[in-house]
């Protein structure tokens, strides 16, 4: 087995009213210099301005910019307009803000701090980013956060659709790990520890669905900690393998089709959850448990709930295999329109 390096966050802070401790965390980690705060249009007032004020204790010239989209073009735009003397990137927001910040910090070779405002995805602490430029999808290596600061008060007040999407993303680790096991039989590197950590994250969320649905503090804590653990499982192997398989490939294929059709009703995690039902069936796993967990969470389990028609969903299943060069159940079993339709009907994804 070839050696590989592991880069992990040095500080993870999860708790109530911790948003204002960004500057003290940076001081604790001996991070100095001029910070750049990246945030979104909606998260600016929710948390971005507060983080900027906290960081002005380190440097009164702290700069803030709004991230408009999760694309390589957006990273290039920001790279051109920010001053050369930025020493740290702090992303305060959802998935697009965090992914853009991670890649920007990686390119600039400076530290990155992740401050999620919604528990909507498992990239909050990983080295991977997912960016889209039109139909093109990019899964890239980026900067592992030196610190993750998750404020439960902020996360609990996120739109529930985002919370459910994060839970669905973690539940879909079941099919991702099974796909990884199939690839191991073909000679691909497989880490028992990273796979176990990924599965533990899924189990915690499945057992916490009612608490998450009610936005109870313990439920939201379990969800964000599961998202962070899932992120770490990916960093352990320098790959998204522990949390991304056929279900994620399906989601990316669906994104391409939605872009062509000019619709954008469903979220990445929601799509991964539905994909996990379909491909767990193909893997001969307990797809009913996945579906029941998603239902309990309040996440979509059908094409209709995703806002796509059956033809688009089936086409995404057929396209998924070619989204990226990754061995999954789609390499083990051939799939045509009839088989895909049969799977959709058997699982109730098409009702």
Image (cartoon, helix red, strand yellow):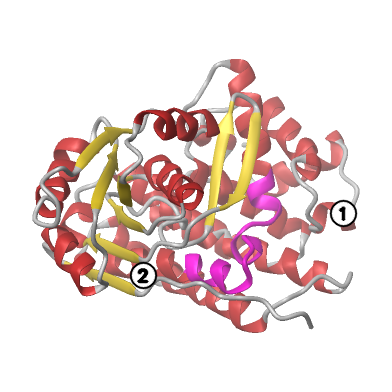
**Residue 89 visible at all:** no
Q: Position of residue 323 (x, y in %)?
A: 75, 41
- Does 188 sit above or below residue 346? below
Confirm whether residue 114 shows in the render.
yes
* Local SS, label 2: helix
Question: Extreme front residue here?
Answer: 85
User: Residue 333: which quarter of the image?
Assistant: bottom right
Tell me which segment is drawn in magenta: 230-249
CB of mark 2 within 8 Å of CB of mark 1? Answer: no
**What's the residue at 56%, 65% (across, down)?**
289
Q: Quadrant of the N terminus?
A: bottom right
Quarter holding residue 206: bottom left
Report the side of 154 relative to 244 (left or right): left
Q: Which labelled disc corresponds to residue 331?
A: 1
Overall secondary structure of the magenta section: helix
Where disc 1 sits, the SS reads helix
Label 2 neighbour load within 10 Å: few <14, some 14-19, many 20+? many
State which tag comes first along the sequence, 2 or 1: 2
Q: Nearer the viewer, residue 223 or 312?
A: 223
Q: Toward the viewer: 150 or 343?
A: 150
**Up-down relation of residue 261 to residue 190 (above or below):** above
Q: Which residue is mark 2?
A: 225
Residue 209: x, y in percent? Answer: 37, 63
């Amino acid at each position: 087995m070839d050696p590989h390096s592991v880069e992990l966050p040095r500080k993870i802070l999860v708790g109530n009213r911790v948003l204002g401790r960004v500057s003290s965390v940076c001081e604790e980690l001996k991070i100095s210099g001029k910070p750049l705060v990246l945030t979104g249009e909606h998260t600016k007032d929710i948390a971005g301005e507060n983080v900027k004020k906290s960081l002005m204790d380190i440097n009164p010239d702290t700069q803030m910019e709004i991230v408009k989209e999760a694309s390589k073009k957006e990273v290039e735009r920001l790279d051109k307009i920010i001053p050369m003397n930025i020493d740290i990137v702090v992303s305060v927001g959802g998935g697009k803000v965090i992914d853009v910040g991670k890649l920007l910090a990686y390119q600039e070779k400076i530290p990155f701090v992740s401050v999620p405002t919604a528990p909507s995805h498992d990239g909050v602490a990983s080295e991977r980013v997912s960016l889209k430029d039109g139909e093109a999808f990019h899964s890239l290596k980026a900067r592992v956060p030196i610190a993750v600061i998750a404020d439960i008060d902020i996360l609990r007040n996120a739109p529930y659709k985002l919370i459910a999407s994060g839970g669905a993303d973690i539940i879909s680790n079941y099919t991702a790990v099974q796909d990884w096991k199939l690839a191991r039989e073909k000679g691909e590197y497989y880490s028992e520890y990273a796979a176990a950590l990924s599965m533990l994250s899924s189990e915690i969320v499945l057992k916490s669905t009612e608490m998450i649905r009610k936005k109870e503090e313990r439920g939201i804590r379990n969800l964000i900690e599961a998202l962070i653990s899932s992120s770490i499982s990916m960093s352990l192997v320098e790959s998204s393998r522990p949390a991304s398989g056929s279900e994620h490939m399906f989601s990316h294929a669906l994104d391409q089709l939605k872009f062509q059709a000019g619709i954008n009703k469903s979220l990445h995690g929601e799509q991964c959850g539905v994909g996990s039902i379909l491909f767990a069936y193909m893997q001969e796993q307990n797809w009913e448990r996945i579906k029941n967990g998603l239902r309990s969470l309040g996440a979509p389990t059908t094409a209709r709930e995703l806002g796509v028609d059956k033809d688009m969903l089936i086409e995404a299943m057929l396209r998924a295999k070619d989204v990226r060069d990754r061995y999954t159940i789609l390499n083990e079993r051939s799939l045509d329109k009839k088989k895909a339709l049969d799977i959709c009907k058997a699982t109730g994804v098409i009702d």
